[in-house]
Image (cartoon, rainbow, N blue to C red):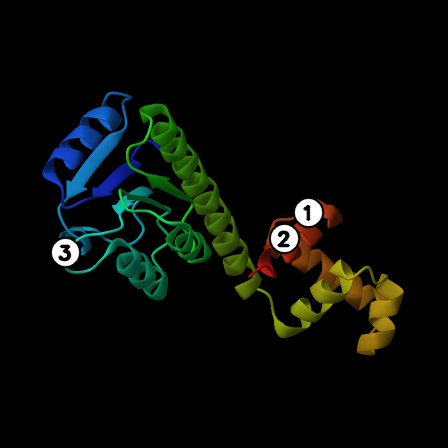
Amino acid sequence: MTPDATVFVVDDDQAMRTSLQWLIESTGMSVKTYDSADAFLANYYPGRAGCLLLDVRMPGMSGLELQAYMAREGFRLPVILITGHGDVAMAVRAMKAGALDFIEKPFHDEDLLRSIRQALEYDQKTRASRSTKAEIAMRLAELTPREHEVMDMVTDGKSNKEIAAALGVSAKTVEAHRARVMEKMRAESLAELVRMALIAGQD
């Protein structure tokens, strides 16, 4: 779990906010509470590690509306929705919109804490994945157009001879391009280069 991860609680019920803060802090996790979606948006900046514990029904912007807004703006904070008035349709809508979990009040403390831990672990994994992809993209940007072509064909399983014939150059030239690709991509093996190409091609 990321050391600076925070559980953001958005609920218009003060007693519920206080109760949730006490429960979550009792496990050693960091918590910040807000009484409305607007208050949360005024204080949150994209990129902060953690997860969002969000009440569905609130005055002003509802939890589902905040969830939709965050998705449009590209906020990647994992969302857990809580409500005292849940129904199947609302749960399905929330999950389809990307919520990691949907919990009805009253809930068991351990169930909620388990869901929060899973959300924080998910956040940590997706952050690491995005960081890796960004690093690979930076390395790819260092390749020349011809080196890109060679890398594409190498990772597609083509031999140096096949690449040379396709590009109309000598096998020695392909070897030189290939060596530069490996160096710029900091790949120790062909398998590692293929793995990088796969990561780079992920949506």
Q: Position of residue 189 (x, y in %)?
A: 72, 46
The reply to whether the C-beta atoms of the residues labelled 3 and 2 are less than 8 Å apart is: no
Q: Secondary structure at mark 1?
A: helix
Q: Quick check: 173 left or right of 22?
A: right
The residue sitting at the bottom extreme is 168
Quarter of the C terminus within the rendering: bottom right
Task: Give the residue at x 83% y 76%.
Answer: 166
Q: CA distance from mark 3 to mark 1?
A: 52 Å
Q: Are marks 1 and 2 in contact (CB under 8 Å)?
A: yes
Residue 15: x and y, percent? 12, 34
Q: Give residue 41's mark.
A: none
Q: What's the amino acid at mark 3?
A: Pro
Residue density around tag 2, few if under 14, some if 14–19, many if 20 or more, within 10 Å:
many
- Locate residue 104: give its quadrant: top left
Pointer 2: what residue? 196
Q: Nearer the viewer, residue 21 or 188?
A: 21
Camera-near label (3 vs 1) is 3
Which comes before the other along the chain, label 3 or label 2? Answer: 3
Q: Residue 25 placed where, x, y %?
A: 23, 25
Q: Give me the C-alpha separation between circle 1 and circle 2.
A: 6 Å
Secondary-structure class at tag 3: loop
According to the picture, the residue beneath numbered tag 3 turns out to be 59
Location of the N terminus (image quadrant): top left
Q: Which residue is mark 1?
A: 192
- Marker count (numbered): 3
In-front residue for pair 150/124: 124
Name the residue type under label 2: Met
Judge the density around disc 3: few (<14), some (14-19), many (≥20) Cα neighbours within 10 Å. few
- The amino acid beneath tag 1 is Glu
